Image (cartoon, coloured by chain):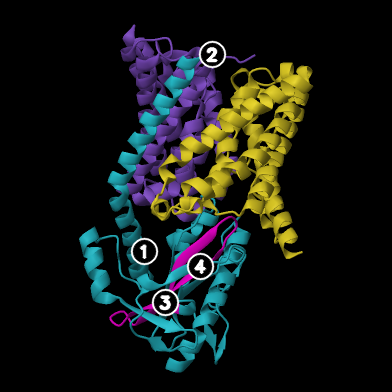
Amino acid sequence: MDLFVHYISLATKSIFIENILLAYFLGMCSFLAISKNVEASKGIGKAVIFVNALTVPLNWVINTYLLKEGALSWIGISALAYINLEFLRILCFIATIAALVQFVEMFIDKFSPTLYNSLGIFLPLITVNCSILGASIFMNERGYTFGESIVFGLSAGVGFYLAIVTMAAIRFKLTYSNVPDGLKGLGITMILTGLLSMAYLAFSGIQL
Amino acid sequence: MKNKYVFILTLTFVCSTLLALFSEGLKSKTLFNKELDKKKNILECVGIDIDALSNVEIINSFSVNIEEITLDISGNVIDNITHDKLKISNDNITGESKYYYLNVEYLPAYISANMNALIIPISGKGLWSTLYGYFAIDLTNYSTVKGITFYQHAETPGLGAEITKNWFKSSFIGKELYLKNELKSIKITKAGKANQSDLYEVDGISGATITSRGVEILLKRDLLKYQVYFRKNK
Amino acid sequence: MNKKIFLDPLIDNNPVSRQVLGICSALAVTVKLEQAIVMTLALTFVVTMSNVIISMLRKYIPSSIRIIVQLTVISTLVTLIDRTLMAYMYDVSKELSVFIALIVTNCIVMGRADAFAMQNKVKDSFLDGLGNGLGYGSMLILVAFFRELLGFGTLFDFRIISPQYNNGLMLLAPGAFIILGLIIWVQRSYTSYVEE
C-alpha cells in the first residue's frame, strides 16, 4: 500500500508539479512545431507516452546490468565486476531510444496508416526529442528503482501530452485573433507557454 | 547491406574506444574533485572561508582542522574503524544513509577542535533525488547550529537547488536544536513566513515546498541517530 | 561566400529565433550568465566538431543510417565534453549536468549536421557550425542577461540591483518563456520576418 501511494505521488509530481515541458523545458522543439494542430498534437502526445513508458525502464535495465560500476557482476566472472562502463551511457540510451522509435514507427504504420500519415516527419523526430532522453537521464540521476522508472516514464509522457494538447487548443482559438506581425507564430507561443507554466506553478505548493 | 552494418559497427567501436581512453585518463582527476568537494563542504560547514583557498590549501586545512571519528549506535567512540572501511547503504524511499562495517551499523562523524564543532553527514529525499550534505553543531552545548551544506542532489535549478545557496545555508547558523533537553530540530516554514527571532525555525524555499520539507525531515531523523552521543557528552 | 555562411546564423538566420531550434536549453540554462556562457562554449564545440566530422565522412555514410551515424558522433562528442567538465570545472558541471547531456538532442546540432554538413565541404561546415553555435550563444546570453539581472539583481554574481527589486518569477519557467517571447518579437520586427 505504501509503495502504491509512493507511485501515485511520483506520478503527480511528474505530471503537474514539475511538468517535464513546462518546468524543465524539455520537448520544446516538437511542442512548438506540432501544437498548431490539435489532432497531430494528440498523436504525438500518445507516441511520447508510449515511447517514454518503454524507454525509461529499458534504459534502467541497461544502466543497472551493463553500465554502472560493478554492473557486469551478474555474468559470474569476477574480473568483470570491476568494469565501469558509465562513459557509454549517453550512447547507449540514445541507441535504445532510436531503436524503439523505429519499432513504434513500424507498428503505427501497420495498424493505423492515417495516424502515420498525419504524424509524418515528427515520429522519427521523437528520437531527438529532449524529453525522451531527458526522462532517461533523470531516471539515472535520481536513482529510481525499476518500478519507479515505469511510473516516471509514463507520467512524464502524460505531462507532455497534457501540455501539448492544451497549447494546441489555445493556438486554435488564436487563429481568429489579431496578433502583431513580429509575435506571430513563435513569439506568441512563447508568451502563452509562459502563462501556462505560471498556472502550473500553482501546483508547487501542494504537500503530498 | 553489408556496407551499412560494417560502417556503423566500425564507427561505434572507434567512438567507444575513444570514450574509454578519455574517460580513464580523466578518472583520477574526477575522483580527486569529488573528494575535494566533500572536504570543501565540511570545512565550509564549520565556518572556514573556502573561497579564498587553493586546492592544496583546502587539503591542508582539512588535515589540520578536521578529525574523523566513528561511533557505534549507542554513542560510544570506536577506534580503529576509519570512514573508508564503512560501506554505505541508502534507503531508496526515505533517502536515509546507513553505514556498515562487517554488518554492524556505525555512525561516522567529524570533530573540529579548532572550530569547536561536530560535523555529521546528513541525507534524505528532496523532491526528486536524495540530498547529501553535512551539518555542524557547536561542541560546547551540542545545540547551537554552526552550519549546513549540501554537496550532492538532483533538484531543480532555481527551486530545490537553492539549498546549496548561501542565503539558505546561512539562515541556519546560530539557530538552536535543543529546548531544555528535548530535540526540537529546525522547522522549515513557508518562504518568508519564518519568525527571524525564533531560534528553531528558518525560511523555506519559494516554489520548492517538497524539497524544503525534505530537508526538515532528514535533519531531524539524522540528528536523532546521534542523540545518544550528544547526551553522553553534554 | 564563406563570410556569409558564418554571419548568417548570427542574426538573420538565428537558430533560436528564426530556425526555432535549441529552445529547450535556451530556457533552462539561462538563469545565470555564467551558465549561459559555459553552455554556449560546450554547444559551439559540439556543433562545430560534429559538422566537421560528418562533413569529412559524408561521402561514406550510407544514406539509410545517416541519423544513427550522426547521433553516434554527437553522443561521443557530448560525453567527451561532459567528462572534461567534470574533471576541470566540477562545480559548474554539477549545475549543468543534465543539460550538457541533452546537447545530444539539441535540434541545432542534429539540424545542422543533416541539413548542411552532409552536403558541404569541411571548411564551410566548420564555419556554419561556428556561426550557429555563436548565434545560439548570443540569444542565450541575452536571455540570461535579463533573467539574472531582473531575478537576482546580479550580473556574473556582481550585484547591480538591490535584492528588494528582484522579480523571482524571472528565475522560474514562466519568466524564461516570456522573456524569450519578447526578445523574438523585437528580433523579428527588426528583420521584418513574419511567420505564417
| Same-chain check, marks 2 and 3 | no
Work out how far the residue at label 4 is from the one at label 3, CA to CA, in angstroms: 13 Å
Which residue in the structure is indicated by mark 1? B38
Q: Nearer the viewer, mark 1 or mark 2?
A: 1
Work out how far the residue at label 2 is from the one at label 3, CA to CA, in angstroms: 65 Å
Say which amino acid is labelled 1: Lys
Q: Are marks 4 and 2 in contact (CB under 8 Å)?
A: no
Question: Which contiguous range is marked in magenta?
Answer: B107-135
Work out how far the residue at label 1 is from the one at label 2, CA to CA, in angstroms: 53 Å
Please identify which colour was used for chain B in the image.
Answer: cyan
Q: Are marks 1 and 4 in contact (CB under 8 Å)?
A: no
Secondary element type, mark 2 = loop
User: Where does the C terminus of chain A fall, quadrant-wise?
Assistant: bottom right
| Same-chain check, marks 4 and 2 | no
Secondary element type, mark 4 = strand
Chain of residue at mark 3:
B
Marker disc for residue B89: 4
- Residue plotted at (25% across, 60% down): B52
Please name whichever residue, B40 or B104, is drawn nearer the observer in this view of the structure. Answer: B104
Q: Are marks 3 and 1 in contact (CB under 8 Å)?
A: no
Secondary element type, mark 1 = helix
Chain in yellow on the image: A
Which residue in the structure is indicated by mark 2? C192
* Disc 3 residue crowd, few under 14, some 14–19, many 20+, Cα 10 Å: many
* Spot occupied by residue B67 in the image (x, y as percentages of width and height): 30, 78
Which residue in the structure is indicated by mark 3? B108
Please name whichever residue, A201 or C108, is drawn nearer the observer in this view of the structure. Answer: C108
* Disc 1 residue crowd, few under 14, some 14–19, many 20+, Cα 10 Å: some
